[in-house]
Structure formats: C-alpha cells, structure tokens
Image (cartoon, rainbow, N blue to C red):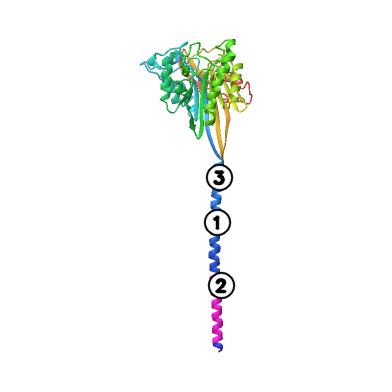
C-alpha cells in the first residue's frame, strides 16, 4: 500500500509540472504574438507619421540670374563675322558663361530683333541682328528671353515672324513679348523647374514711332507711357492698357508659383526711375507679380522691394557698342541673382524669394573689336578695366540707392 501512494504522489507532481509548462508555453505564445502585433502596429503608425511629416515639409528650390540689354550694333556683329557669311558670338560671353550655367533660370533682354541675316543685318536706328546671337546666348546658358522693345518693329513684320520662328524652334527657351498671331500671344506659356512653375509677361513703352499694323497688335506687346503720347491722351490710354495688363496677369497668376514681368520702360541714360516706372511697378505689385525686371535706359537703375515684389528698375546693358563716355555708365550692367523657394505643407503652398545678390558686368572693346562681357567679381576684370574698383563702387551705390540693404558683390580683390 505504501508503494502505491508514493507512485500516485509522483504522478501528481508530474502532471502538475506538465500543466505549468504547458500553461507557460501558451502564455508565452499569446503574449509574444500580442507584442509582435503591437510592434507591427507601432512600426506602421511610425511609418505613416513619417510619410505625413514628409508630405507636409516638402521644399523645392530654383536659382535664377538676370542680365540686361543684348544690344547688337554693327561693330559687334562685324567682330563676330567668320568672313564667310556666318557669325560666332560665343567668345564675347565666355567669361560669364560659367556663371550663367550654374542657374536654373537665366534671363536676358534681346534688345534687337533676331530677323536673321537672310533679311539683311542692320544697325541703328533700325536694327536687324543675326540669329547666331541667340545661339550664343543659349550656349551661355540663357533660357528666358524678353523680345518686346522699342526696336522690335525696326525691320518690320517679316523680321518679327522670322524671330518668332527662331525662338519657337528652341524648346528649352521661353521667349515672350512678340508673337506671330493673336492665338500665339494668348497662349499660356508655363515652364516647370524643380517642381516650381513660372512664366513671364513682357511689355514695351513704344516702338520708336513705327506703327504696329492694325489688327496685328500681337507682333509686340505695348504698354504706352508719357514718352510717346501727348498729355491729352496719356491718362486715358494708360488706364486702358492697364486693364489689358491686368487681364493678362489674371489669366496666368493662379497657374504659376512665380510670375515675372519684364518692362521696357524709363528714360535712356538716366539712373533714376521715372514716376511712370514707379507707378507701373506699384500696379504690377498690387496684382501679385513676384519679380519686375526693367530694361531700356541702357544704364543701371536701383533695385528695391515693393512689399514682397522684387523690382529691378533697369539692368542696364549686357553688351553693346555704345560710347564709353559718362564714366562707362553705358558699359556697366547688372547681373542679379536670387533663389526661389517653394514650401508645401499639406494643401498650403508658400513661395519666397531670397538671397538676392547683384554683380556688376563690364563690356570691353577696343577700336570696335574684341568685345567681351567681364564680371567685376572675376579676376579677369584687372585685364580689361584698370580702374575697375572705383567704377564698381560708383555703380554699386546706384544699385543700393533706394534700399541700402540690397546686396552687391564686391569687386575682385576687395573683401
């Protein structure tokens, strides 16, 4: 009897231990599964939070540079002649090319119409320039061009249509201000760079008294000022054209992140903005234009802000053969750069313009040959303009005249 009791006791212990082990295994299984499930849920939750955070904090950037008038006098295209009926202007821009090519968006004003040599090239007062000029500018990195100037009508409709055909063949370039038809003018042209959508509108104060054919106003965008209309008609016409400009802006404003307007305005060879320039700039700013770029005076005028709108009243000449009188004022131009930032948080989009900087450029030539555009910040300036530091300081003061906080790059060798 005693042996049986012992066996029963040992059997009970074995069963109890087995049950404990089994229970522990079951517990571990379920707890482990729960923990694993919770861990997976936490990972998914964290991934979702990271995705949402990434979506809310997306930021895009595009860099931009702007230069002034490409004014092609006969001495310039003669200097570019290959002696066989062709032209090569690339050497004239070789010192600025490495700078321009760093930027996503690079603007210049084509002062003279590129009607091409087939129509016969010509000089002041009625210009027509070789299309190889455009080839050289594109090679240098420019991809945004304004065509509306007081010289657009110089060689007539044929030259404008030839120019438009040339620019339309350059798929990577946005050229504005002069068109081949009403439909062409009204076409919305939008370019996207680094997820930033932009466009440009372009107007000129007039066409040097050469009438734009009735019904063909598309040939050049005109926004007249007091320079070409008398006092009786001035206000009425000015207000009428304001309505057209407003319509143009409203057509594109909501479709782009950045809207630029290139204005051919002002008084030649004066470094002060006229009251009309200031009025136009204020009006454009009120309509939501982000950047206003001025041309025509052939000399530098100040850079400033109107609220959040950057205004460059005149970039001056980029290249020309104008006389080196009046202390080089027609030979010194402005090269303005900036950064465009687009920040997306959910459905909110914020656009900002920052890091606005200005470099001066000088057009060198001797005996009407050897034309070269030289940045003042480049070591090459020493070889082309011995008095460059004094000249730089003089025109840097013009740039900063309306806003002393505007940045101007120092001349080479100056801290």
Which quadrant of the structure image shows residue 223?
Answer: top right
Q: Nearer the viewer, mark 1 or mark 3?
A: 3
The chief SS type of the magenta part is helix
Magenta-colored span: 4-23
Q: Which residue is mark 1?
A: 39
Q: Is 172 on the left-hand or right-hand side of 84?
A: right
Q: In the figure, 165 relative to 193: above or below?
A: above
Say which label, 2 or 3, has the lower sequence index.
2
Marks 1 and 3, Cα distance to the nearest angstrom? 20 Å
Marks 2 and 3, Cα distance to the nearest angstrom? 47 Å
Marks 1 and 2, Cα distance to the nearest angstrom? 28 Å
Q: Is residue 212 magenta?
A: no
The image's mark for residue 20 is 2
Q: Determine the secondary structure under disc 1.
A: helix
Q: Which residue shows up at 54% across the image and 53% down it?
A: 43
Query: Please, which residue is most extreme toward the bottom here?
Result: 1
Residue 47 x %, y % = 54, 49
Q: Is 196 on the left-hand or right-hand side of 157?
A: right
Q: Is residue 272 visible?
A: no
Q: Determine the secondary structure under disc 3.
A: helix
Quadrant placement of the C terminus:
top right
The image's mark for residue 133 is none
Say which label, 1 or 3, has the lower sequence index.
1
Q: Which residue is mark 3?
A: 52
Q: Residues within 10 Å of mark 3 (few under 14, many from 20)?
A: few
């Amino acid at each position: 009897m005693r042996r049986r009791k012992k066996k029963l006791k040992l059997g009970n212990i074995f069963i109890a231990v087995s049950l404990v082990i089994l229970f522990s295994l079951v517990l571990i299984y379920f707890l482990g599964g729960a923990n694993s499930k919770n861990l997976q849920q936490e990972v998914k939750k964290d991934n979702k939070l990271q995705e949402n955070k990434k979506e809310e904090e997306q930021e895009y950037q595009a860099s931009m540079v702007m230069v002034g008038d490409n004014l092609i006098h006969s001495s310039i295209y003669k200097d570019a002649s290959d002696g066989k009926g062709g032209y090569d202007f690339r050497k004239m821009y070789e010192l600025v090319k490495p700078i321009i090519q760093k930027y996503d968006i690079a603007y210049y004003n084509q002062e003279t119409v590129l009607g091409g040599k087939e129509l016969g090239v010509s000089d002041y007062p009625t210009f027509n320039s070789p299309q190889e000029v455009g080839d050289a500018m594109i090679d240098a990195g420019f991809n945004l061009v304004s065509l509306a100037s007081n010289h657009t009508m110089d060689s007539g409709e044929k030259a404008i249509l030839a120019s438009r055909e040339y620019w339309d063949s350059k798929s990577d370039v946005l050229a504005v201000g002069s068109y081949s038809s009403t439909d062409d003018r009204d076409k919305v042209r939008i370019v996207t760079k680094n997820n930033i959508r932009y466009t440009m509108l372009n107007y000129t104060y007039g066409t040097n008294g050469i009438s734009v054919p009735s019904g063909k106003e598309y040939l050049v965008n005109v926004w007249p000022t007091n320079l070409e209309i008398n006092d009786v008609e001035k206000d009425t016409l000015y207000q009428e054209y304001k309505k057209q400009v407003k319509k143009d802006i409203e057509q594109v404003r909501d479709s782009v992140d950045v809207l630029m307007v290139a204005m051919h305005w002002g008084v030649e060879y004066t470094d002060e903005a006229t009251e009309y320039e200031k009025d136009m700039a204020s009006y454009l700013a009120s309509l939501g234009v982000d950047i206003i770029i001025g041309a025509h005076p052939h000399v530098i005028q100040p850079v400033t802000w109107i609220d959040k709108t950057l205004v460059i009243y005149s970039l001056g000449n980029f290249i020309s053969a104008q006389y080196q009188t009046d202390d080089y004022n027609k030979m010194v131009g402005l090269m303005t750069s900036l950064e465009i930032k687009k920040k997306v948080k959910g459905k909110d989009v914020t656009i900002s313009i920052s890091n606005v900087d200005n470099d001066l450029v000088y057009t060198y030539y001797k005996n009407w040959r050897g034309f070269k555009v030289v940045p003042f910040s480049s070591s090459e300036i020493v070889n082309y303009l011995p008095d460059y530091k004094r000249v730089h300081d003089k025109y840097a003061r013009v740039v900063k005249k309306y806003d002393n906080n505007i940045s101007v790059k120092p001349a080479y060798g100056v801290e």
